[in-house]
Image: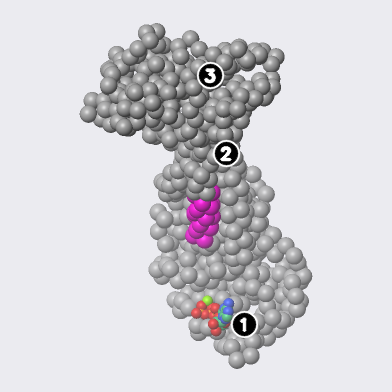
Amino acid sequence: MNLAYRDVRHKLGRFLLTCAGLGLLLGVVLAMIGIYRGLVVDALTIARAPGIDLWVVESGTRGPFAEASRIPGDTREAITRVGGVAAAGSLTYQTVEAEHQTRKLRLYVIGYEPGRPGGPPRLIAGRGIVRSHHELVADRSTGLGIGDRIALGRNTFSVVGLTEHQVNSGGDPAAYVTLLDAQKLQFDLAPPAYRVQLARGTGTAIRDTVNAVVARVQPNVAPDSVAESIRRWKHLAAITQEGQEAILTGSLVDRARRQIGLFTSLLLVVSAVIIALIIYTMTMEKLKQIATLKLIGAPDRTIIGMIVQQALALGFIGFAIGATLISATKDYFPRRVVLEADNMLVLAGIVFLVCLLSSGLGVRAALRVDPATALGG
Amino acid sequence: MTEPRAPQPLVRIRNVSKHFGEGETRIDALRAVSLDVFPGQVVALLGPSGSGKTTLLNAIGCILEPSGGSMELDGDVVYDERWLRSDLRRLRLDKIGFIFQFHNLLPFLNATDNVAIVLNLAGLGGGEARKRAVDLLDYLEVGNRRNAFPAKLSGGEAQRVAIARALANRPRIILADEPTAALDSKRAGIVMDLLRKLAVEQEAAIIAVTHDEKIFDRFDRIFQLRDGRLDTGS
Ligand SMILES: Nc1ncnc2c1ncn2[C@@H]1O[C@H](COP(=O)(O)OP(=O)(O)OP(=O)(O)O)[C@@H](O)[C@H]1O
Ligand SMILES: [Mg+2]
């Protein structure tokens, strides 16, 4: 007869309640891990979206995401002519606050050249931009729908397509417009004095600037060698896709990542302490019964089995509840929560170990209990 | 009172002593206690509170290590200045049945399983153990409550289930610490009759601690303890 199961069944409500409590706690831990992973994934999304091999930016910068980068608009033509480059496109990035149905909306506006690298990835609805002006492809998380109209700067754009999961490292959803529209927007939103200078053509910068040029290299050509030849232009820097991703994870989200990482570790420690306490208390409550078992001749194996099985059942059910909870709710978080199987497995492993270790504490107490305590009151 | 003249006592204790603590705080709970209990005998341990009754019972039950002396159970010398057996729990499982003042049934097992568990522990399979448990409960006239959990049993019913558990492995030595304290005099009488029946039918030795004057006449012998010493009684 399995004593662990019998004991649990006898106090099923209480046991399940404890499991549910533990499940909520583990759910929070999982959510934290998911948010952490989500942060990293989000940070890389925009950089990965164009599916290119090279980033050409202003020399001396690690742009366009980690640092500001401005290069002349004609750079793209020059890059296209570099040996080994298959295609290139100009891009601008800027964060714009707009209003939509009385609601403030922060958009990460990406200007690109339709037909060239840098446009929106897979659309989940609508179509890509076909007209050269005032069309916009927005991310679903903006809350905009196909056909919606939204004012940016002095123009009104209409939404023609939707993407999914396209946000910048700050969580602002992306909005794709044509390069020309984006440059106009940059001009409209620039400080007035600067704008006057630009209009007169006497400004330090000319109006036709972009933030980066992205390039796809031909098959069998190493991006590094192409980057090497681009770097010979004094005013340009070239970063491979790999390098760009390293910059993003290494510097841009690094602090946020460490913050959440530390918090997640703390949460794990707290969970471990709570699991240990629950299991220890579960055993302490049974000391008298354990003494009785010893008195009637039960071997240690029976007693250890009972404690360890209950501890593992608690951990397993708690984890299952937590995992189910977060899987079911992850899409309702304001920012992306990414649950990866390997992260889940690691957490499950940790929970298993903690349960085993803390049942060790209980077992120690149980083995030390004097069978004589079962006698008398 | 009849005293079977069996040559071999089931419980044979010589000069067993037990003290707790040392120096100023030393308490001599047992001082050179010697006694024999023979198969078929029902004996009582009597004495004021703190006189060492529970201590003596625990020593006989191999729950408490004496400080000196020797003990022989069913022909085996189990203690002689030190434990001579390492598997005391197995010894208890096979030879000794305990009946507690409070029934001490496992709250998460029903009456049948509370009895069946000691049979399981002794190696009897599930179905067979349960069948034997039910037989025992019937024998103790609580068969009708066999599926009830301890919390739902009356004091007398619970005590009888506990006795069934103590008897399950047919131990030859049964130790009872105030087995009737929680029962009314009618129930106490029934339990005592039962213990007597057992002693006779199974050739067992029964040692019961009691304060209960109503049942003194049910014992073959009464050992009186005072300050850890045995006054050899009637
Ligand atoms: N574990 C222990 N540590 C210290 N002293 C103990 C311990 N167990 C018993 N004693 C002492 O030994 C003496 C005998 O105790 P015991 O429990 O055997 O008495 P008793 O006759 O069963 O009393 P009661 O009728 O109240 O149950 C008492 O003075 C008690 O305080
Ligand atoms: Mg006592």
- The chain letter for the residue carrying disc 3 is A
**Which residue bears the numbered disc 2?**
A250
- The chain letter for the residue carrying disc 2 is A
- The chain letter for the residue carrying disc 1 is B
Q: Position of residue A76 (x, y in %)?
A: 53, 16
Question: Where is residue B55, by image quadrant?
Answer: bottom right
Tell me the crowding category of disc 2: few under 14, some 14 to 19, or many 20 or more residues within 10 angstroms, Cα based: few
In the rendered structure, which segment of residues is drawn in magenta?
A: A265-286
Of the 4 image quadrants, the one containing the N terminus of chain A is top right
Tell me the crowding category of disc 3: few under 14, some 14 to 19, or many 20 or more residues within 10 angstroms, Cα based: some
Which one is in front, A336 or B122?
A: A336
Distance, label 1 to label 3, CA atoms, is: 94 Å
Q: Which mark lies nearer to you, 1 or 3? A: 3
Which one is in front, B108 or A226?
A: A226
Q: Can residue A286 be seen from the camera position used here?
A: no
Q: Name the element at disc 2.
A: helix
Q: Which mark is residue A75?
A: 3
Q: Position of residue B220 (x, y in %)?
A: 58, 76
Residue drawn at x 57%, y 84% is B225
Q: At label 2, which amino acid type do we have?
A: Gly
Instruction: Point out the residue furthest to the left here.
Output: A102
Q: Which mark lies nearer to you, 1 or 2? A: 2
Q: Are marks 3 and 2 on the same chain?
A: yes
**Which residue bears the numbered disc 1?**
B20
Which one is in front, A270 or B39?
A: A270
By secondary structure, the bulk of the magenta-drawn segment is best described as helix
Q: At label 3, which amino acid type do we have?
A: Thr
